[in-house]
Image (tube, rainbow, N blue to C red):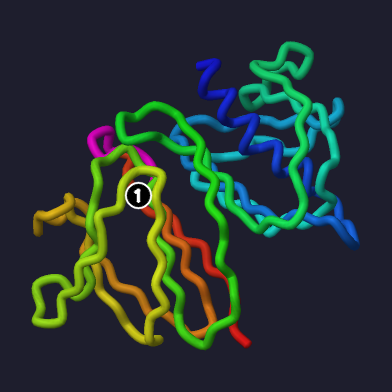
Amino acid sequence: MRKLFSIMVVALVLLSVVGSASASGTVTGYVVHGIPGLPVDVYVDGRLFVKNFMPETIAGPLVGPANRSAYVAIVPAGGNPANPALAATVSFPAGANFSVVAHLDANGAPTLSIFDNDFSKTSDARLIARHTAAAPAVDALFFPGTPNELRVGPLSNGQQVAANLTPGSYTGALVPTGTSDIVYGPFSANLQGGKAYIVYAIGSLTGGTFKTITQVVNIGY
């Protein structure tokens, strides 16, 4: 449990460090809570900053001053901040746009991944898939079972793959790498130009909590 909270303090502290605006020397971040069954309260410098931060939640964009130190305490939701599960003083450097994801590793243990965000302008639809679930390496199949089938992978836990696509309707599915045995899907999506679609696989495939959550960011001209 302490390891799990150690991971959460690193992820959730981003909320506090970039929580106030700054004209220069900024950091931009998102926080993704992908660990099932762990709502938490976050205290920053003795004040309640985030109450009942729930799994499957994406927070951001959060833009604020870099290199600001903050004392952060993490407690189970409703817990006593005087007895935190973990406390730390932390800061983040300037200049980055990134997502911090608390999630399960391939074996189901809590872990943390940090992804750089490519939000450069485009008129295409940018699809970004991030493997943050307790599951083996997978391939993404687009238009599975058709002459236009496209396989993208392998994608292992903690990795991402990105592609700019022509706007339109897409069907897809996830399969263990090198196979055609669908473990998630098929699903369909209408991808619009000038938008980034960040798809996170979270939870546990064998534990019955596997799902995807999607973040959409405008990146058009």
The picture quadrant where one finds residue 8 is top right
Residue 3 rendering spot, x and y as whole percentages: 52, 19
Relative horizontal placement of residue 210, taking residue 206 as reference (left or right) = right
Residue at 15% across / 71% down in the picture? 144
Q: Position of residue 79 (x, y in %)?
A: 68, 19
Residues in magenta, as a range? 201-208
Q: Is residue 41 above or below residue 153?
A: above
Report whether 55 appears left or right of 130: right
Near-viewer residue (159 or 40):
159
The residue that label 1 is drawn on is 211
Res. 199 image quadrant: bottom left
Percent position of residue 110, x then y:
45, 29
Q: Residue at x 61, y 47 (%)?
A: 31
Residue 11's x, y, as percent?
Answer: 62, 38
Q: Residue at x 44, y 35 (%)?
A: 36
Q: Is residue 72 above or below residue 197?
A: above
Q: Residue furthest right?
A: 23
From the image, which quarter does the C terminus lie in?
bottom right
- Give amino acid for label 1: Lys
Q: What secondary structure is found at the residue carrying circle 1?
A: strand
Task: Judge whether residue 67 is colored magenta.
Answer: no
User: Closer to the camera, 177 or 54?
Assistant: 177
